[in-house]
Image (cartoon, rainbow, N blue to C red):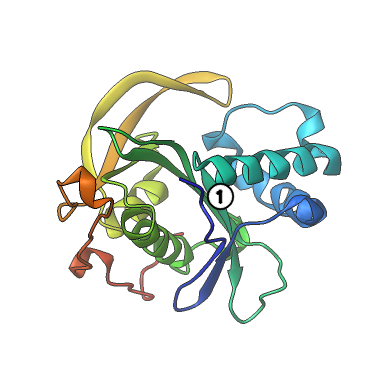
């Protein structure tokens, strides 16, 4: 299923899918945020920090949207819609059929952390994934000592399901990860209906007073 929605809004944010022409802005965002997010990310080659690499990456993201396998939203303040980018939220490895699931990843520029932006974006993105994309299960995998990321997931309604040992190679080291999952308990069990329903409850009520990232 092609993903045609490329912009969402929450109370304070714009979540926007970008294209190849936005490569300079995306590169600038990664240069700013990398010192704070590098401990939680796979190692990258020096080529990653070039306009050419991000232009190719954004083209790949567009292709993924067209085939319905992933969508990445870049975060902007509504008060500054032209930028700078302050974070990103990615729904990847979307699998249909009996699974109807995807992985969720997110990161935030350190200068914008601590203001509840990431929780707000994740709640809005989860609503989109469970209603518009009609997914049944969202999974975020988080290193146990990454407490800010765990708080974001928990405040967005994700529930810790368990631990996988040496699950991903992060910053050059095989790291254990906790699985945080959000289920659509109102998902339509009739596949012929072709729709899913998600009831917005207390778990997805946006709280801008939170001190997470």
Q: Residue at x 33, y 73 (%)?
A: 207
Q: Where is residue 60 in the image (x, y as percent from the top left)?
A: 67, 38
Question: Would you place residue 87 above or below residue 137 in this image?
Answer: below
- Where does the N terminus fall, quadrant-wise? top left
Q: Residue at x 54, y 57 (%)?
A: 4
Location of mark 1 (residue): 72
Asked if residue 170 can be seen in this view, the reply is yes
Q: Where is residue 193 in the image (x, y as percent from the top left)?
A: 22, 52
Q: How many marks?
A: 1
**Along the line of sight, the residue nearer the viewer: 14 or 106:** 14
Mark 1, other Cα within 10 Å: few <14 / some 14–19 / many ≥20: many
Q: Which residue lies furthest to the bottom in this view?
A: 79
Q: Which residue is drawn at 29% across and 35% down?
A: 179
Viewed as shown, does residue 57 lie left or right of 104? right
Q: Where is residue 119 in the image (x, y as percent from the top left)?
A: 40, 61
Q: Residue at x 25, y 32 (%)?
A: 98
Viewed as shown, does residue 3 lie left or right of 183? right
Viewed as shown, does residue 178 lie left or right of 70? left
**Along the line of sight, the residue nearer the viewer: 24 or 213:** 24
Asked if residue 212 can be seen in this view, the reply is no
Viewed as shown, does residue 130 lie left or right of 41? left
Task: State the image quarter where residue 141 is shown.
Answer: top left
Q: Position of residue 108 (x, y in %)?
A: 55, 54
**Along the line of sight, the residue nearer the viewer: 142 or 60:** 60
Question: Would you place residue 82 above or below residue 87 in this image?
Answer: below
Task: Label 1, secondary structure: give it.
Answer: strand
Question: Would you place residue 179 above or below residue 126 in this image?
Answer: above
């Amino acid at each position: 299923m092609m993903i045609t929605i490329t912009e969402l809004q929450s109370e304070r944010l714009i979540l926007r899918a970008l294209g190849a022409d936005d490569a300079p802005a995306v590169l600038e965002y990664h240069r700013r945020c990398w010192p704070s997010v590098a401990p939680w990310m796979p190692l990258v080659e020096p080529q990653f920090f070039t306009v050419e690499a991000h232009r190719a990456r954004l083209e790949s993201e567009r292709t993924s949207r067209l085939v319905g396998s992933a969508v990445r939203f870049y975060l902007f303040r509504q008060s500054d819609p032209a930028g700078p980018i302050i974070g990103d939220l990615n729904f990847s490895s979307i699998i249909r059929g009996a699974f109807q699931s995807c992985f969720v990843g997110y990161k935030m520029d350190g200068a914008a952390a601590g203001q509840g932006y990431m929780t707000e974006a994740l709640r809005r993105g989860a609503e989109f994934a469970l209603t518009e994309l009609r997914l049944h299960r969202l999974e975020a995998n988080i290193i146990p000592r990454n407490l800010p990321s765990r708080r974001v997931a928990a405040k967005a309604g994700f529930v810790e399901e368990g631990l996988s040992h040496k699950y991903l190679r992060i910053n050059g080291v095989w790291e254990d990860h906790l699985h945080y999952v959000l289920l659509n308990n109102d998902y339509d069990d009739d596949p012929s209906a072709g729709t899913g329903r998600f009831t917005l409850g207390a778990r997805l009520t946006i709280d801008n007073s939170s001190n997470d990232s």
